[in-house]
Amino acid sequence: MPRDWDELFRLISSGETDFVYQPPHVYVQLEEHYNKSELLTALSRRGERKHHALLIVRNDSNISNVEELRGKSLLFGPKFSTIKTVAGKVLLQKHGINYEKDLLEYRYGGSCEEVALNVFLKAADAGFVCDDVTQNLTSPPDKTWPLPTNSLRVIASAEECPTWIFSAVKSADAPTVSAVIRALLSLHETQNHQGVLKDIESLGFAPLLESNLLILRKKFL
Amino acid sequence: MKLNCRLKLIIAISLLVFASQLTTACIIIRQSEESLHEKNHIHGEELAQNMAEFSCQAIVSRNLASIYEQIQVALKYNNVRHVVVVDPNQKVLVSDNLEEVDSIYPPEHIKKFYFNEKLDSNPHYIDKNGETIAEITVPITLADDLLGHVILGYSHTEIAQKISNLNNKTMITLLAGFAGAFLLTILLTSMITRPLVQLEKTALKISMGNFEIEKPDTHGNDEFNLLSQTMYSMAKRLEELVYNDPLTGLYNRQLLNIRLSEELARSRRHVRPLALLLVDIDHFKRINDTHGHLVGDEMLVAITSLIAKHIREVDCLARFGGEEFIILAPDMTEMNARQLLAERIRSAVAKEEFNILPGKQSLRITISVGLALYPTDAKNEKELIATADQALYAAKYSGRNQVRTYSELKDYRSVP
């Protein structure tokens, strides 16, 4: 787990790592280092190759659209999150909000649950969460979701992005890469792999579709 | 109900042991209770203090979600029932129950606080589940600024359960200990009071005229043992006074009656004859009148001593009256009783020179003997003595210094 961008770049350049699991916008910036024929994408919890972020506020909040975030506090996702941070910033930009200047405050949050909790607890006025928490907001939540139903509401959705990408660096041993790719493709939630998949909030792996990357390149970079 | 000494001792010692055990158990339970409360209280305070320090950082960095996560960790401790972080105005910032966020603490259902100094100094309330909850409040401060409070509610249920278990175990131990102590008390009391009980039995026997008592153990030297030995000596002395003639040392009439009854019973049981010889010293009055009563007494002693030499071990010699003696001779036919016993004694006395007078002067004396046999001559004790008396009278009448049997009188009387 690299501490920052520089360390990740160093690990790849020096050949200290053969595989990288990263957010898509990170992949796009480093793709020249990867073997493009061996790319996988982690399926979202809904089993899709793409997902997006939701901008949430407390249900009793007087914020009803993105523009009303001016002068308010906002929680992005983790700094390297494509959908909750990169796409979130793009969403603000589209609505004419400069997150550096127009907000009272912005911070980088943690998991979707943490962001949602902080919004609910009024530690922030709004925050970005993954789209797969939608059902927890309106219908009876799953056991791990702490918030009461209908305590938060969605005021906007960010652009769709590919899910996390698993790639092998060019210098990696081909047979090893093939074996790892086969192993990852065989992971399935219904089998005994739930433990592995739960940690990465995924239903399994699937080959990456180049078309999804095109969207990312076109809209964010 | 009359309680004897042993029972009183057992009850007294048992009550004493039970009271002492109960007191000890109460003290142990009380101390354990206090210790458990203190331990729980300290643990709760430490937890609340840690929460306060953590909350301070979280409030400053405005990451209240991390407080919620920390609360979830705290709730995993057995006794922690709720954790709430409030601002200085008691408005709930974070709570284990997110429904309470933004409300004013305490909520309606736990507003009835009470204090129980026996438990600890914290306010308490009974929650919806009936559990006793103690509240620990720790301020959240940054420098001198008050940011809020951490309110931690911990349950006394586990302590109550532990105390209940302790009570049960203590009660079982107490009962087992008491049962053991009770048995030990019985054993010890029995050991201690055994000589006393023995004394009581001995005294009872003596009071009923039974002097056949066991000789006490002479090895012990405690008070009871000494008392037993003294009582034995007293009983033996009393027996002598009651049953023995003080002059001759022979059985007196009272014991003679007892022995006669016993011998008759034995004779009946074994269908064996019993001979009764009534011996009277001839002209004994003359000795008294001539030589004085002291010489008379000496004569009585000398004669009884002589008679005693001629009777068997199984025979019984008793003083019947002034100068009259009775010999009970079991398992003897009339002929044997006459020849081997009565005549031999009479002859021995008649031949004896009694040196009881001052100087070299000796005294000679004779005796007359009346003999009767059970069951041929009599049916009971009274008749047996009466028939022997009649035979003695006949011996006297016939000139003294002779033996007469009742059967001879019968034969004589039966002659037309």
Image (cartoon, rainbow, N blue to C red):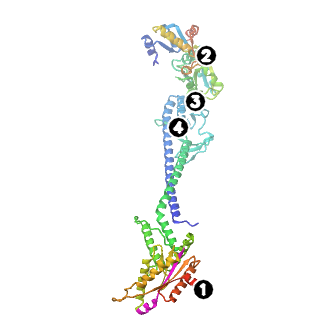
| Residue that protrudes farthest toward the left in the picture | B359
Tag 2 residue? A47
Residue A170: image location, x then y, percent: 47, 7
Pointer 1 indicates a residue of which chain? Answer: B
Q: Nearer the viewer, residue A100 or A15?
A: A15
**Between disc 1 and disc 4, whose residue precedes?**
4
Q: Secondary structure at mark 4?
A: strand
> Mark 2 and mark 3 in contact (Cβ < 8 Å)?
no
Residue type, mark 4 in image: His
Image position, residue A131 (x, y; %): 61, 19
Residue B16 in sight here:
no
Secondary structure type for disc 3: loop
Q: Residues within 10 Å of mark 3 (few under 14, many from 20)?
A: many
The chain identifier of the residue carrying mark 4 reads B
Q: Report whether mark 4 lies on the same chain as mark 2.
A: no
Q: Are marks 1 and 3 on the same chain?
A: no
- Direction front: furthest residue: B416
Q: Which residues are magenta?
A: B273-290
Marks 3 and 4, how far apart at CA? 16 Å
Circle number at residue B415: 1
**Amino acid at dot 3:** Leu
Residue A121 is labelled as: 3
Residue A14 appearing in the image = yes
Q: Nearer the viewer, mark 3 or mark 2?
A: 2
Residue under circle 4? B149
Mark 2 and mark 1 on one chain? no
C-alpha separation, residue under disc 4 versus residue under disc 2: 44 Å
